[in-house]
Image: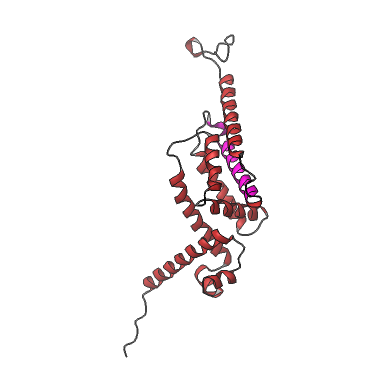
Amino acid sequence: MPRKRAQSPSVAAAAHAARRSALTDQLASFALRNGLGASVRRLAAHHRTSDRMLLYYFGTKEKLLVAVLERISERLDAILQRFSSPSATSPGRFLAEALRLLANPQTAPFMRLWSEVIARGARGEHPYRNVAARIISDWLRWIEARIRLPGDKSRREQAASILAAVEGATLLEMTSPGSTKGVAAFLSAALDGSARGLRAAAVRAAPVRGRGGKVQPGEPIVR
């Protein structure tokens, strides 16, 4: 009987990567449905494998968690690309759109899961602390790139305000569904009102140039 030929290292590595990717997808779907509290043993049992086999593909539980969260982030990025406006919008309108995602069955599981990651990170749990810090940084950059604000001095502060409002609303909805009804319109108006106030302050503070480009101290700041 002919001896079965062994796989080449490259073929074996490709098969290992494919199986690891498939497991990551399955674990990501499980986490979106059930949260992040499951043990490796429970995860293995649910996916009809052993905890040793999971660790064979991921190395440690921490590496498994990071891989799963990265896959969830990739899925959410793809979804948000479909929801995102191609042009920048006001901070208030952006916040209203972001809060509507809490009620969308396609995005709500992601919002709840990221709130869980951030809460665990705030308690200092490993590896959630580092993952949460990276998530917050990525979210702030993503929001900053999509809000329109004259005089960009407060762009980071506006982005942080939006993120804080979304995370707070997510936690409230997780604890008491329906408790944030109506807050989107109120917060949106408040945020755009503060942006208009900042813009007016910037106009008032700007010096008026007279002939020859010199500031005219006797002229009113706003005409």
State whether residue 78 is above or below residue 188. Answer: below
Q: Quadrant of the N terminus?
A: bottom left
Image coords of residue 64 (percent x, y): 54, 64
Image coords of residue 31 (percent x, y): 55, 61
Task: Please tell me how many numbered marks the rendered image carries.
Answer: 0
Q: Main secondary structure of the magenta part?
A: helix
Residue at image coords 46%, 50%: 79
Image coords of residue 40 (percent x, y): 58, 69
Image coords of residue 114 (percent x, y): 57, 52
Q: Nearer the viewer, residue 45 or 181?
A: 181
Q: Quadrant of the C terminus?
A: top right
Indicate whether residue 165 is drawn in magenta. yes
Q: Quadrant of residue 19?
A: bottom left
State whether residue 142 is above or below residue 152. Answer: below
Indicate whether residue 187 is drawn in magenta. no
State whether residue 142 is above or below residue 207. Answer: below
Q: Nearer the viewer, residue 128 or 73?
A: 73
Residue at image coords 40%, 70%: 15
State whether residue 8 is above or below residue 78. Answer: below
**Magenta residues, start to end:** 152-173
Residue at image coords 48%, 9%: 211
Residue at the bottom extreme? 1
Please give left or right for residue 86 compared with residue 53 in the image.
left
Please give left or right for residue 11 compared with residue 59 in the image.
left
